[in-house]
Amino acid sequence: MSSGAPKWVAALVDSVGAQGLYTYRLPPDLKVAVGDILSVPFGSQQLGAIAIQLLSTPPPDLAPADIRPVAAVISRGMFSPTYWQLLERVAAYYQTSLIQVIRTALPPGLLGRSQRRLRLLPDAIPPEAEMFLSPAAVCVLSQLQQSAQGDYTWQYLRQKCRGAYRGIQALVDRGWAESYLALPTPPRPQRRQAVTVVQVPTPEDPTVTKRQREVLSLLQRRGGDLWLQEALQYCRTTSATMRSLARKGLLVIEEREVLRQPASPELGADHPKVLTAPQQTAVETLRTDQSFAMVLLHGVTGSGKTEVYLQAIAPRLAAGQSALVLVPEIGLTPQLTDRFQQRFGDRVYVYHSGLSDGERYDAWRRMLQGEPMVVIGTRSAVFSPLPQLGIIILDEEHDGSFKQDQPMPCYHARTVAQWRAELDDCPLVLGTATPSLESWSAQQLRAIAEATEPQPASPEATSQSAATLPPRHYLVLPDRVHQRPPPPITVVDMRLELQIGNRSIFSRSLRSALETMKSREEQGILFIQRRGHSSFVSCRECGHVMMCPHCDVSLSYHQSRSGAAEMLRCHYCGFGQMQPPRCPACDSQYLKHFGSGTQRVEQAIAQELPELRCLRFDSDTTRAKGAHRALLARFAQGEADVLVGTQMLTKGIDLPQVTVVGIIAADGLLYMADYRASERAFQVLTQVAGRAGRGEQPGRVILQTYNPENPVVQAVKSQDIQHFLTTEQQQRQALDYPPAGRLVLLRITSPDRAAAEHTAQDLAAHLASRLDEAWSLLGPVPAPILRVARRYRWQVLLKGAIAAPIPDLTDLAKQCPAHVSLTIDVDPLNLM
Ligand code: ADP
Ligand code: ZN
Ligand code: ZN
């Protein structure tokens, strides 16, 4: 063995009560690769572990003699080595430990389900072996000898024999039995009976009755292969009839494993469409360039991006590769998942945090089996262990929910997806109607570098040369499919409405648009910003405001439908209580909510436009599982004329019959104390506007605001996105904000008010002394909402030049007292 060869391995022990990285020695004759499943000693037990990192030096805090050896390799190549490289990179960049990243990535207890078993080696056992053994060992031996296989779990033997552990050890030491780890098996794979027609009887066959023939032909009409239960219902027959057909050899009834795929309604098949010219260019780029590249697919809503994804994925599947599709929120994109399932059938797997443990476990089992599949999932699905990854798609790439605020690692799925595409050498497609400034500027940078490439660059200038930047493509789908024009956007100045005495939340234009819409039997969408602060409850006599007992915020009023219970809820910690009938401070009965949210819009419609039927689409009415889909279906079936909703409306819904989109008040979005407020407002307003006129009828958008001159409103109106992004980019550049600079946010929280403040000050003072001039320190300051969920929150912001390496901050946690916690958020999106 050469001196540089690894002699140690860091292995992930992941069992009930034990999860962590531990170092083991590699016996000279044992070949171990990263990703192998090992059997390792752990305390007095033998546990399953995953080889994560091969080491050529042992950790400094361990004496080599104390490091125990790996016992065996149980399974090879279950995870690809690049998978663990990815997790290491996430840990390093987001300044947290590898084990913390593993906890985010892997479903807990993946190996915990494996069992340690003891197997008798009968040939090695001498006659009268009992003579040499202790009573415990004799007990274990006789248990094994009495069993048919000579094989039991440790757990069983422990129940049967006193002192089983020492008995087992004695048998193993003598070589009379061996201990091994049984690979994880699914807890209880669901099995169901299926019927398959295998033969059609000849018309002359006298043994087959008329009724039996009927059943067979009904089955064939449904493809000849059904679950037994469905077949019985469909053919209106009994299982006795089925069994007699089976006995005649005409059909087969067998048990089949059902993967716990979350149920989706019956879907028809869907076929590839003939592509438009820009779609064709996009698909061809993705088909020719199969190695790592960043592809920004910029297309307005309805321009056919999803069709591009589908046609780019198809050849990868055919080549035996898999595809990963990341979306902001699964519940909000049922239509996207449906289209994937219609195109690719049961090769599509939906993976998100709402799955049950069983569903999640099944998904992992299938992924690790390595058959080509399409995984559609939210943020954490970026860690799906898909081997043979052929393409990654990140839809709605501008969406903030791809970023995790807490707990650590505070990762951005787009950044992780980029590393993953790089490691697995496949393209990453970023699809959006409103590119994030990050993706757009990176694209510009690459274009500039390429344009200047022919000139010989000096060695110092290589950081800007095209060769060191990831390959990028900018693909534009400029038009809606079928040349449906984008809807015109009318900006209404609400100040003028007030001047002429219109106090309604509906301007005259919006009102008349809604009336026309109703008369033509078309449908509309009314958008209101989520979580307006005006939905608080206060007393009209004494001014008392209902506050969350755990946070420094007012409670928000919620009522899922008229007549339902009136609830108050905290949007920060989830605290909820009933709306009290009287003011807790003065006992007045005039304790009222000042809503301007969806409920108020609903009420205003009832009062002012009573002929309009409306449905509310917000976090109250869509809380239940599957509620999004159900509500959208009810709307699509014409159960209402208008859908009143929040930001949820901006995501992936395709409602062709919508012709009018009304934005009740853009203002709430425009003035948020955040350097990203304009970008976010532009994205949301553009996305909402894009919901109009997606069907045969042209649409229109009415945007109401008290600030029509606002540049964001102007940019939305003109839809000049390049101009907007250029201006925004210049503003960020002037202030060194991302993407022109970079930020790291330290969040310091504690139930102890003074401890949070003092720790923040200590950390800031400590950092000030060691940061180089590329970084500046802002704070410490109390967070905009000081107390959330009983914890006081302070923050320190580090701002650095874009090219400056991020300083290592991992030692800071050690400087925090026990009851103070520190979160390091690299590239934070949310500064609140
Ligand atoms: P996006 O994902 O950009 O919003 P979609 O892919 O959903 O756009 O396309 C919008 C609509 O146009 C969908 O109903 C889709 O089925 C249809 N469509 C997309 N591409 C084509 C095409 N090449 N030919 C015909 N219809 C298409
Ligand atoms: Zn009061
Ligand atoms: Zn709260």
Image (cartoon, grey):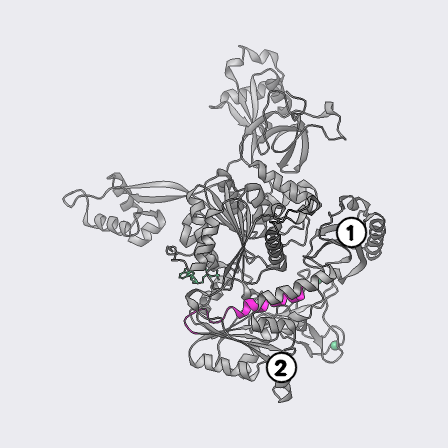
Q: Amino acid at mark 1?
A: Ala
Magenta residues (range): 675-697
Q: Earlier in the sequence, mark 2 or mark 1?
A: 2
Dot label at residue 417: none
The residue at 45%/59% (across/down) is 278
- Residue 242, compared with residue 170, is above or below; it is below
Instruction: Find the residue positioned furthest to the front.
Output: 455
The residue at 64%/46% (across/down) is 456
The residue at 58%/38% (across/down) is 82
CA distance separating discs 2 and 1:
46 Å
Task: Point out the image quarter for the C terminus.
Answer: bottom right
Dot label at residue 774: 1
User: What is the secondary structure assignment of the residue under circle 1?
Assistant: loop
Circle 1 residues within 10 Å: few <14, some 14–19, many ≥20: few
Task: Please state if 764 lies on the left or on the right of 360 as rendered.
Answer: right
Instruction: Name the residue tied to disc 2.
Output: 494
Q: Quadrant of ligand 2?
A: bottom right
